[in-house]
Amino acid sequence: RKEVEQDPGPFNVPEGATVAFNCTYSNSASQSFFWYRQDCRKEPKLLMSVYSSGNEDGRFTAQLNRASQYISLLIRDSKLSDSATYLCVVNDNAGNMLTFGGGTRLMVKP
Amino acid sequence: GAGVSQSPSNKVTEKGKDVELRCDPISGHTALYWYRQRLGQGLEFLIYFQGNSAPDKSGLPSDRFSAERTGESVSTLTIQRTQQEDSAVYLCASIGLAGYETQYFGPGTRLLVL
């Protein structure tokens, strides 16, 4: 089993749709969680951190469920510019080792 | 500098040649990571440096791969006797503090082995 698992997609959605991605992690001792965005042929860039209480940044909402060991990302009112690969990242803190999921590809269409 | 920089941005080499990739992390960042990303694939961890501790080399795919870091600054990733399957984007990232800091990635080096 991979340490961090994501559905690779692609998720094809129309503009304005709401789309949600889930990510599961295997290390119950993991402490920090992030969502990164990676555009085609670009490096990954931080989208948002994921806090225990859940957090929102504009159209993006991230949630953490420690009991079930999964993280979610919700995108509301999808824009064409949201098309990218979304990477789930988990930090085990002990050695500052970050583990990346394989990414979920989102394609927003007109 | 303002961000993580990597050089060269692109490298084309012949099978069997050695290549050296360079990463300049954000000043003051103690941790530095190298990843490999093949076309259409996820990030593959290669090696991790944290301060003066022994590096975590658990992700290096073979003994043809090695990396060094001088103190808390520049790192070089060396691939000896390159093979076609080494073709990928090699990404470097740095992080400031343990715990809740995030990684900042460089733009990557696109390596093509002919």
Image (spheres, coloured by chain):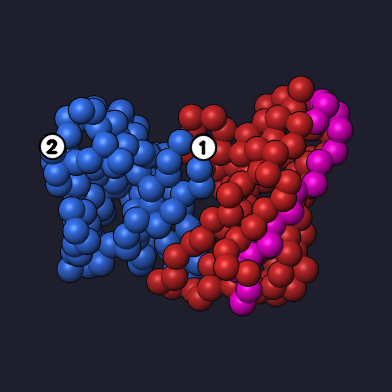
Residue that numbered label 2 is attached to: A17
Secondary structure type for disc 1: loop
Mark 1: give few (<14), some (14-19) or many (20+) Cα within 10 Å.
few
Give whichever of B22, B59 is nearer the camera: B22
Q: Amino acid at mark 2?
A: Ala
Q: Residue at x 68, y 44 (%)?
A: B9
Q: Horizontal placement of A28 versus A72: left or right?
A: right
* A39 in relation to A13, above or below: below
Quadrant of the image containing the N terminus of chain A: top left
What chain is tagged by disc 2? A
The spot of residue B77 in percent (x, y) is 74, 50
**Magenta-tinted stretch:** B13-28
N-terminal label among 1 and 2 = 2
Q: In the rendered image, is residue A104 in sight? A: no
* B41 in relation to B71, above or below: above
The colour one sees for chain B in the rendered image is: red
